Image (cartoon, rainbow, N blue to C red):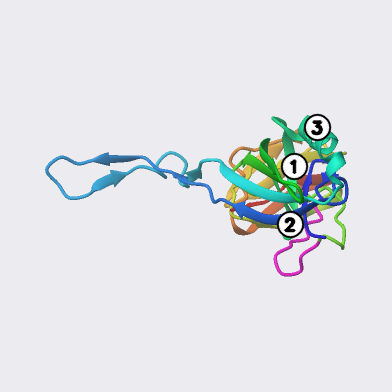
Amino acid sequence: MKGVKFGEKHSYKDWNLILTSKTVGFPSPKTETEDIPGADGSLDFSEALTGDIHYENRTLEFEFEMIDSIKNWDNKITEITNYLHGRKFKIILDSDPSFYYYGRVSINDFASNKSTGTLSIEAEVEPYKYDLYSSTEDWLWDPFNFETGIIRELKNIKVIKEKVITIIGRRMKVVPTIEVKNTNNMKVEYEGNSYDLQEGRQRVLNIEIKEGENYLKFIGTGEITVDYRGGCL
């Protein structure tokens, strides 16, 4: 039965809730404009600071029907409310299992009559939905979507003199974390610029993984791991 996973709890498997409707809102762009007196139109500075548009949070809304015996409704609602209400969770939709949303969940309403109980749950989440697995985590076949999924295996890569890796980026720009082991001299080249890397974990703020193919050339000898997690609208 299709449903929603909030943290470690699944709406149907753990609570016997049937998902009857869902609304996935889209984030509003953060825009910055200035009117020009005596002229047509206005100036748009929305992308002036970072070169990209940014977004407000988005809202997810879910309606569930309870299939437990009516005598169990009060206890079930108490259990669900204690677990969910006001807390932040990873939220995974069974209909879109390759990604998760992250945000704060609220119980909006519980309505009942003699035969049915209806539970309304809302979540205010971050604007992007994130890849279920990062480039350093083991991914599984079951939730993998062969149409939209991207397999990235960027953990413990051996570098002998030089190594080029390709990262397929999603819509959200991300500065990845690079970990370097067993080296005294490692550099990375990205978009024509070279950066020195130190032993251990670090982020190079000028290395920003963008949508599409991104090439990182590591020069030296050692072992590198690139921790990247993509995000989509």
Mark nearer the N terminus (1 vs 3): 3
Q: CA distance from mark 2 to mark 3?
A: 50 Å
Membership of 26 in magenta stretch = no
Q: Which residue is mark 2?
A: 165
For disc 3, the neighbor class at 10 Å (few under 14, some 14 to 19, many from 20) is: few
Secondary structure, magenta segment, majority class: loop
**Label 3 amino acid?**
Thr
Q: CA distance from mark 1 to mark 2?
A: 30 Å
At x 64% / y 56%, what residue is drawn?
214
Foreground pick, 216 / 72: 72
Residue 198 is at least partly visible in this image: no
Q: Quadrant of residue 89?
A: top right
State the mark number for residue 14.
Answer: none
As drawn, 185 above or below 41: above
- Asked if residue 68 lies left or right of residue 230, the reply is right
**Label 1 amino acid?**
Lys
From the viewer's perspective, is the residue at label 2 or at label 3 nearer?
A: 3
State the mark number for residue 90.
Answer: 1
State the mark number for residue 78.
Answer: 3
What is the magenta range?
A: 144-154
Foreground pick, 130 / 24: 24
Q: Residue 99 at what x, y percent from top left?
A: 72, 53
